[in-house]
């Protein structure tokens, strides 16, 4: 096991070193933060062409067995039996209070076989939580060792085809197993069309090199991954979601099927029903600061009379938007787009407006 | 005759007739990455050595730039308000941060010269 002092190393670390990556520790992993092009160019390149991300810190779990749909429908607010083969679904793990333990993507691979992709920082916690639930069901639960690469941007499909991996049959939020030990999904964390491909480490370097030989492909680090997802209005667990926020307040209730909002057997169902019936007290919103100064996570949100009415949970600069972007939680009554709020950064009062999410249009390839 | 000093915090200070021009080094701008905002002091502000004089913000984080000595801010680089990336493209030229009238130039003694600074980041 690793701790903060000795982070885990990506299988393709040498490739990132050769590319001149600047590294930092994230969720216990030594990760490429930026490459010599810099965060701004990496971000824009992803929106314009194809950015390659090594996200092998994320954890894949394979679940198999006759009890799999029952298990998933208990663990997540998910109608697992209704998922078609190849279909992916964004969902969450909740605690009994409907607090969000993690957000996940679940893909049905077969009649009784599913793939879960979980956040790196929560992988150990998720595994313990899921194993405890799994003990009541006839399922096998297997953490997978894979390299996970994301190729994101308008050229992603063409680049994949050129690299010998034709995934053009996939639409947004569907997945497949193109080769033995591989898993590919048309999904991502940038707001762009693109793919996430999990593959065995011993095949990964060759595949990554093949992708990088294509002039349209550039490495993109975690710094731009963060600015891309923030512009796309996507949540980062640990910042925008945590065990004290619920799907209604987090404005991700769209991920909970309508029938399950009223009745469900998943963990946290009763608490979530109560929250929905009573109305969430606060809501996650986009925030557009006036001027050029970025507003960062942790900054308070204040109303005109100086009362604290919320908090910023993610913030930075949006290279495509061309202005600072942020998201945070505010009292429900103040969550309408256009609502004027304030924050303070180093003693300076900064005006910001509640802004619709995403900041930049999502460009997924829908079916 | 001007003299250039460097600090351990990767600032450069060019002194001419008792006025110091302060900026960050090429190494520092490279470490910080693309800057998107520079918070400048007010002209006339009194700074003590070690005070945060400027905050430079990259896409990802904010970093302080400290006053290398006591003195009064005589000019700030207004061009950075609309084009903070000047600090990245020309950190020791057009990307300077502020100028200050030094209260006591001898406070800069003991800082590194260019050769010592280059050796420190090598």
Image (cartoon, rainbow, N blue to C red):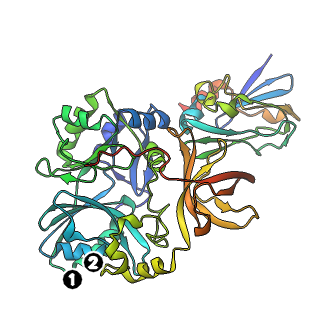
Q: Secondary structure at mark 2?
A: helix
* Residue that carries the numbered disc 2 in the rendered image: A74
What is the distance, in whole Å, between disc 1 and disc 2 at their CAs?
10 Å
Q: Secondary structure at mark 1?
A: loop
- Image position, residue B7 (x, y; %): 68, 35
Residues at marks 1 and 2 touching, judged by CB atoms closer than 8 Å: yes
Q: Residue at x 48, y 47 (%)?
A: A231
Q: Is residue A38 above or below residue A249?
A: above
Q: Are marks 1 and 2 on the same chain?
A: yes
Q: Quadrant of residue A89?
A: bottom left
**What is the residue that sits farthest to the top in this orientation?**
B1
Q: Where is residue A275 drawn, in percent x and y?
A: 47, 78
Nearer to the camera, A87 or A12: A87
Would you say B82 lies left or right of A225 here?
right
- At x 50% / y 47%, what residue is drawn? A359
Around disc 1, counting alpha carbons within 10 Å, would you say few (fewer than 14), some (14 to 19), or many (20 or more)? few
Residue B86 to residue A28: above or below: above
Mark 2 is surrounded, within 10 Å at the Cα level, by few (under 14), some (14 to 19) or many (20 or more) other residues, namely many
The chain ID associated with circle 2 is A
Per the image, the residue denoted by label 1 is A136
- Image-quadrant location for residue B88: top right
Question: Is A72 placed above or below A150 here?
Answer: below
Which disc, if any, is residue A347? none
Question: Can I make out residue A150 in this image?
Answer: no
Nearest to N terminus: mark 1 or mark 2: 2
Which callout, 1 or 2, points to the residue nearer the camera? 2
Q: Nearer the viewer, residue B67 or A50?
A: A50
Which residue is depicted at the point 53% across and 66% down? A283
- Residue A185 vs residue A355: left or right? left
Q: Where residue A186 sits: x, y (%)? A: 26, 48
In the rendering, at what x and y percent does residue A212 appear? Answer: 28, 32
Q: Do we see residue A294 in this rendering? A: yes
């Amino acid at each position: 096991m690793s701790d903060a002092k000795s982070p885990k190393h990506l299988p393709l670390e040498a490739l990132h070193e050769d590319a001149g990556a600047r590294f930092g520790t994230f969720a216990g992993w030594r990760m490429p933060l930026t490459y010599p092009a810099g965060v701004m160019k990496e971000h824009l390149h992803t929106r314009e062409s194809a950015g390659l991300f090594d996200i092998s810190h994320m954890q894949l779990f394979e679940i198999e067995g006759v009890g799999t749909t029952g298990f998933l429908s208990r663990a997540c607010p998910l109608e697992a039996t209704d998922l078609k083969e190849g279909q992916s679904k964004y969902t969450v793990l909740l605690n009994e209070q409907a607090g969000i333990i993690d957000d996940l993507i679940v893909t049905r691979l077969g009649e009784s076989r599913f793939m879960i992709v979980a956040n790196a920082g929560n992988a150990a916690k998720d595994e313990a939580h899921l194993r405890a639930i799994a003990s009541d069901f006839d399922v096998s639960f297997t953490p997978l060792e894979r390299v996970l690469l994301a190729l994101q941007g308008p050229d992603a499909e063409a680049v994949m085809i050129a690299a010998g991996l034709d995934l053009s049959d996939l639409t947004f939020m569907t997945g497949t197993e193109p080769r033995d030990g591989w898993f590919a999904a048309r999904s991502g964390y940038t707001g762009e069309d693109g793919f996430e491909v999990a593959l065995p480490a011993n095949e990964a370097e060759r595949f990554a090199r093949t992708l990088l030989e294509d002039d349209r492909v550039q490495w993109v680090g975690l710094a731009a991954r963060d600015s891309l997802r923030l512009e796309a209005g996507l949540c980062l667990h640990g910042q925008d979601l945590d065990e004290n926020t619920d799907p209604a307040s987090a404005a991700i209730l769209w991920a909970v099927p309508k029938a399950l909002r009223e009745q469900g057997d998943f963990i946290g169902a009763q608490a979530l029903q109560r929250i929905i019936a009573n109305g969430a007290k606060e809501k996650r919103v986009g925030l557009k600061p006036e001027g050029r100064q970025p507003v960062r996570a942790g900054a308070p949100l204040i109303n005109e009379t100086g009362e604290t009415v919320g908090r910023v949970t993610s913030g930075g600069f949006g290279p495509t938007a061309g202005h600072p972007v942020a998201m945070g939680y505010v009292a429900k009554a103040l969550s309408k787009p256009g609502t004027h709020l304030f924050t303070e950064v180093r003693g300076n009062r900064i005006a910001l407006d509640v802004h619709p999410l995403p900041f930049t249009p999502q460009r997924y390839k829908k079916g | 005759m001007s003299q250039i000093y460097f600090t351990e915090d990767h600032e450069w200070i060019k002194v001419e007739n008792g006025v110091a021009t302060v900026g960050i080094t090429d190494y520092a701008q490279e470490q910080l990455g693309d800057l998107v905002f520079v918070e400048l002091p007010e002209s006339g502000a009194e700074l003590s050595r070690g005070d945060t004089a400027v905050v430079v913000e990259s896409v990802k984080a904010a970093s302080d730039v400290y006053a290398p000595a006591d003195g009064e801010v005589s000019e700030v680089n207004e061009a950075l308000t609309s084009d903070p990336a000047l600090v990245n493209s020309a950190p020791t030229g057009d990307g300077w941060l502020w100028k200050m009238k030094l209260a006591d130039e001898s406070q800069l003694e003991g800082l590194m010269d260019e050769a010592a600074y280059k050796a420190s980041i090598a």
